[in-house]
Image (spheres, rainbow, N blue to C red):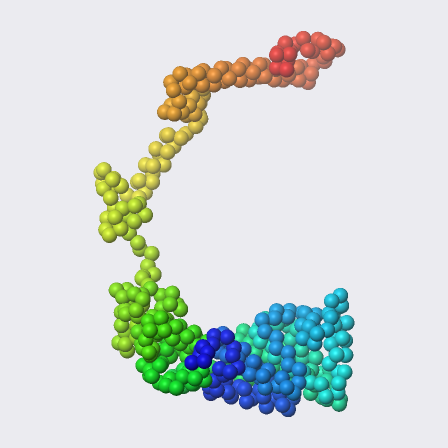
Amino acid sequence: MNRLPFSTTPDVSGYFPAVSIEAARRTVMQVLKHGTGIPLIFGESGMGKSLLLRVLEKFFEDDCHVVYMANQRLRTPKSLYQHLLFSLHQSYCGMDENELRLLFLDQLFQRETYRMILLVDEAQSLGRSTLEELRVLLHYNRDENPESIRLVLAGDRRFEERLTHPHLYAFQQQVVARCYLEKFRREETDKEILWQLKQVGCETPELVFPAEARKTVHQLTEGVPRIVHQLCQQALAHTAELDLSHVDETIVQTAWEILQQLPGSGNGIPTAGSSDNKDGSLIIEFGTLDDDEPIAASFGADQNTDIMPESLLPETPITETAEELAEKLETEFAQTFSFPPPKFELPDLGRMLSDKIAPKKKQPEIQQRESCQKLLDELSIMEQLLTEEISVINKMKKIESNCLSRRVRRVSPTDILASFPEIPKLK
């Protein structure tokens, strides 16, 4: 072999004319030659959209200027014209959208026979305004060369769904062909593998890749072209590492496990966690989807048993019902944490605070007594202040009552303050 036979990137030299991709190539080329409208190519990831666009680019690059736009998030018309001017080696800095459009058209129509083909890959990332701008751009063709700009769009099913939007109704009218790329059939996968080996100089591809190995490749990849190439390339690399002369089913299985990072023994032989289906295909079991794991596992117990450790079991069996148990717990909680009681005195409050707050187990006995005594002193001061405030309030109520009931003689502020000897203390 003069090179790697199975390329995982778009390679024009490795183009295999399968039924769906070859039909799409012929249709798109027919539309581009006559310039009758916009052809669309649809296909999921790995089906060969980029390869088909590269084949079209290679075919038309000698007759016209081909712009291949791949993975470009052209959300606005301004970004579209910047990319087009970049392909023409023109400056596009410091210009608004209208200036970019006029500069592009001026560069495009400098020659009457000049033609441009726009090949847009990943069209599902285009903005709606960009699609509308592409449609309008086709109308700028000159009378001397009415098909100077031609367009091909390739995308997945999301792009096809977006085209049904009412705002893109005018764009849909310009579409003249819809091509769909499909997976390889069983015989196409077989021919694809042999054809790629012949292209790189392999004289006996049937011996290098036997029929059973090719059949296994198709079963595992389901005929997706990109995955077929990846699996075959990995299988050839593993065969070379083992210094073998041909690829067998076991090597294909091992290569598939390497690609998919599946658990296995490394040699393709089914392990204890796998089983064979009735049709001979390998089924790998990853475990159950149930969440009923043993409770003991979460407590660090032996995971091979479903029984809780004896240290976690209650000493006596629980005979109460759920309602009785809930009521019992609620009563115990109320008795333990009811604070403060309905009727209490300040000394009682001090004792309760000392019992609840003082850390009996964490502090020495002497520090505990000092903390309790300090708390009792503060509560005594608070009690004295509250008593004096209550006395002031009672006297004020009495003065107010006297003012409302009888005529009060005039008194000075000094006389009023003399009636409240507690005020200076409160200050």
Q: Is residue 89 left or right of residue 244?
A: right
Residue 258 at what x, y percent from top left? 37, 67
Q: Residue at 61%, 69% (x, y): give it.
A: 73
Q: Is residue 211 left or right of residue 403?
A: left
Q: Nearer the viewer, residue 34 or 319?
A: 34
Residue 149's quadrant in the figure? Answer: bottom right
Query: Considering only vertical position in the picture, is 254 above or below 380?
Result: below
Residue 248 at what x, y percent from top left? 31, 77
User: In this view of the protein, can residue 224 be seen by the observer?
Assistant: no
Query: Which quadrant is home to the C terminus?
Result: top right
Query: Which quadrant is home to the N terminus?
Result: bottom left
Q: Residue at 59%, 79% (x, y): give it.
A: 153
Residue 44 at what x, y percent from top left? 49, 76
Query: Considering only vertical position in the picture, is 349 above or below 27?
Result: above
Residue 108's quadrant in the figure? Answer: bottom right
Q: Is residue 192 left or right of residue 127?
A: left
Q: Nearer the viewer, residue 258 or 315?
A: 258
Q: Residue at 76%, 75% (x, y): give it.
A: 103
Residue 312's quadrant in the figure? Answer: top left
Mark count: 0
Residue 255 at what x, y percent from top left? 36, 71
Q: Residue at 48%, 78% (x, y): give it.
A: 47
Q: Nearer the viewer, residue 294 or 64?
A: 64
User: In this view of the protein, can residue 246 be seen by the observer?
Assistant: yes
